[in-house]
Amino acid sequence: IIQQTQHQQSNDNLIHWQRKRSLTVLTIHSIAQSIMQKRRVNIKTSDQLPVTIQDTQICNNRSSTAAAARAERRANRKNKKNDAVRSLLLFVIFMILLGLILLTDFDYVSHHPIVVSQLAPLSDGVAIENSSSSSSAGIASGSGRKRVVDGGLSMNGSLSKFPSLKYALENSDLVGVYFAASWCSMSTPISNKIEELFSVDSSPLSHRVLSPSAGDGTDEITTRKEFSLVYVSSDENEMEMMDYTRSNWIPVPFDSPDRTNIKQHFRICAQVEMESLGIERRRQEIPSLVIIESATQGILSMGGKDDLLQYGEDVLDHWISQKDLVRTLEE
């Protein structure tokens, strides 16, 4: 009886525990359903399910992808903006350069001068050049194309209109027209270099340089020289000019109109002379050395002073090779 009683109590306890566990499970299930129902009420559409951990991960991945896409779009917009700014800047620079080119007055000095005998004289010392009749002198031909030349000569024409250059042009193959002044500190090293190469008797090139004319018409040039140097001074008086003139230099007389006319012709002078000479914009400042071929009276080099420093004792051979090259190309 006791054993049966104990067995019955054990069964009753087991049943009670099972009932209690079932009740607990039902209670938890009811609470979960209640919470789920509240969530469904808060969702606008009935077909959506409650948010789960997996849904959260998917949303995070989508957010990261969207953020990356937005960053890429912002970077693309920034790059496009930078490209537009660069294009605008390049366009502005191009327009500025184009404006400078259009405003710059380029004077080309031909290696084929106008032959005075082929110019038809007009009144007041003005001549008209007929291009078709002067093609043999190397001037570009064209039917009926004419050009008015002041006094029969122009920047592209003969330099024989300057009497101070005539002696050098007739007796040397190359003429260096040197613009300088004794008061100009930048002229000193160039003048010293010229004296070192051409003026001193012991210099390596002195025997190839034309000596100055005696001025009395008794000069007898038996051998044509390869080079002559004409000095166009910007000194304040004749004494300063003559003191600064070195051996083998052919100075343009201080009182000669050529001293002014040559500066105006080449548009090379000191800054203090620009107003008195009527030069608004200089081609070069002093010191300057212009190398001219006597036969054609065309300019070989506007940078003679730089050639002196670069080539030294070989500078004359360099200018002669330039002359030969120009002749070859023109032929």
Image (cartoon, rainbow, N blue to C red):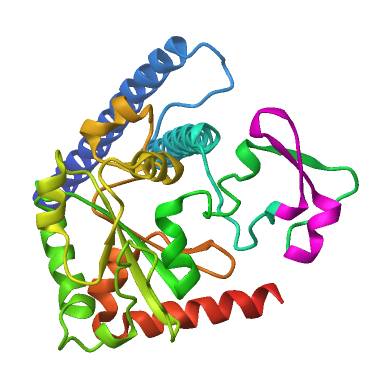
Foreground of the two, 28 or 268: 268
- Identify which residue is drawn at 9% across, 51% down: 185
- Identify which residue is drawn at 21% across, 32% down: 272
Rendered location of residue 174, percent (x, y): 44, 72
Q: Is residue 129 magenta?
A: yes
- Identify which residue is drawn at 24% across, 40% down: 270
Rendered location of residue 90, percent (x, y): 47, 39
Does residue 292 appear in the picture of this structure? no
Answer with left or right where residue 35 lies relative to residue 201: right
Q: Quadrant of the C terminus?
A: bottom right
**Count of number-bearing discs:** 0
Foreground of the two, 119 or 94: 119
Foreground of the two, 305 or 62: 305
Task: State the extent of the magenta-drawn residues as a range.
Answer: 117-137
Q: Is residue 196 magenta?
A: no
Q: Is residue 13 shown above or below 136?
A: above
Rendered location of residue 18, percent (x, y): 26, 39
- Identify which residue is drawn at 38% across, 33% down: 281
Rendered location of residue 70, percent (x, y): 44, 34
